[in-house]
Image (cartoon, rainbow, N blue to C red):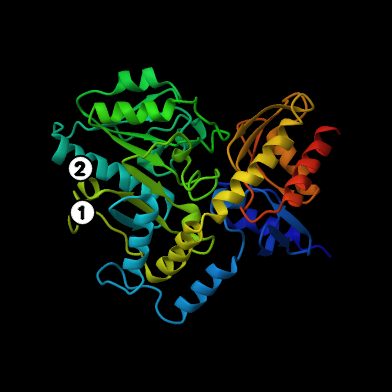
Amino acid sequence: MLRTPEAVRDAERWTAHNYHPLPVVVASAEGAWLTDVDGRRYLDCLAGYSALNFGHRHPTLIDAAHAQLDKLTLTSRAFIHDQFADFCRELAALCGKDMVLPMNTGAEAVETGIKVARKWGYQVKGVTPGQANIVVAEGNFHGRTTTIVSFSTDADARADFGPYTPGFTVVPYGDLAALTAAIDENTVAVLLEPIQGEQGVVVPPEGYLPGVRRVCTERNVLFLADEIQSGLGRTGATFACEHEGVIPDMYLLGKALGGGIVPVSAVAANRDVLGVLEPGQHGSTFGGNPLACAVATEVVRLLATGEFQRRSAELGERLHAGLRGLLGRGLVAVRGRGLWAGVDIDPALMTGRQACEQLMERGVLAKDTHGSTIRLAPPLVITAEEIDLTVAHLAAILAL
């Protein structure tokens, strides 16, 4: 007797319906593959929204977690533990920044960035107290806290969660003129995703990010890059900003930083920015805990080799070439960079959800977004043969 139907019913019965998962009940995983409670294997082409860049249960990361579990897991930031300085130093070096502030989730990193930018604006830039504003982009996805959804343009994320936090100006993504016009004397930061993931892996026009960097410098405004999904190897570089030679004032990091084992996020910036914080002004009980730091330090060391960035770049070329071959054969658009792709299916054929359900039946797991769009973001440990398998299964469902 199959166990999946009952497990799905139990999940629906006992949990709030804030997600609409595919009816797969995962029991174990290794590398790029998942196995469900009935023993069926699936190729993971979502990788936990980039939280699993290094695959499931990467041996180096699992070993680090096991070793730390036997010693120390939590102290709170009331004390310093022996894993903390190594993590902060090595992540700062990877980012080319002076300082790191560790947190837990991506949304916490974004909230931290917002708070730091506002405080910097008042203390350093001299913005009128209580008047700081931040410029953001339409189609953004930075998390789901009350403040963050206040500047979302996604009705599902925003509707019925007001009253909303003020202090944000929304402009079209990729429109440098609109962004420039929105900056005034009280603007403290521009907050952007270098590639918009939830929107469907939308890459901005060439020259946009360098333009944002230039305008921020000219107007004395911080450039906050949300690299929570796009960073740490996903696009074929350590950070997506690198593809256009852009260095933001602040990196917001998460997801892959925890190695798929523990939630780890961080803000990385120079001392003249992060240095505005003083004791008691911001924190987290679990932020920068020993277990998180032990795992995340190994993540940083894996990235420091450059191996995963190269894999993403090389295999990404193979993935995108395969997907482009399906244009006009059921696909109407393909976007992305590295091992990250947004695929628009002809809506006359099926919705994105229907496509993901059909892929699931063929043993490939992906995620839909916005109508007939699906996202592909496999672990960076995927092989060339598994890339080809993914494209072949997509081609097969489009031909049905």
Q: Amino acid at mark 1?
A: Gln
Left-right relation of 176 to 53: left
Asked if residue 224 can be seen in this view, the reply is yes
Q: Secondary structure at mark 2?
A: helix
Reply above or below: 174 against 303: above
Q: Residues within 10 Å of mark 1 (few under 14, many from 20)?
A: few
What secondary structure is found at the residue carrying circle 1?
loop
Question: Residue sitting at 19 percent across and 37 percent down?
Answer: 121
Relative to 160, 374 lies left or right = right
- Counting residues from the N terminus, which is met first, the one under dot 1 or under dot 2? 2
Is the residue 111 above or below the residue 381 in the image?
Answer: above
Could you tell me which residue is drawn at 37 percent across and 18 percent down? 178
User: Which quarter of the picture shows residue 126?
Assistant: top left
Residue 200: x and y in percent read 58, 34
Q: Is residue 23 left or right of residue 186?
A: right
In-front residue for pair 356/196? 196
Q: Nearer the viewer, residue 80 or 325?
A: 325
Residue annotated with mark 2: 119
Could you tell me if the residues under marks 1 and 2 are in contact, i.e. CB atoms within 8 Å? yes
Q: Which residue is mark 1?
A: 281
Q: Residue at x 50, y 72 (%)?
A: 65
Which residue lies most toward the right here? 400
The residue mark sitting in front, 1 or 2, is 2
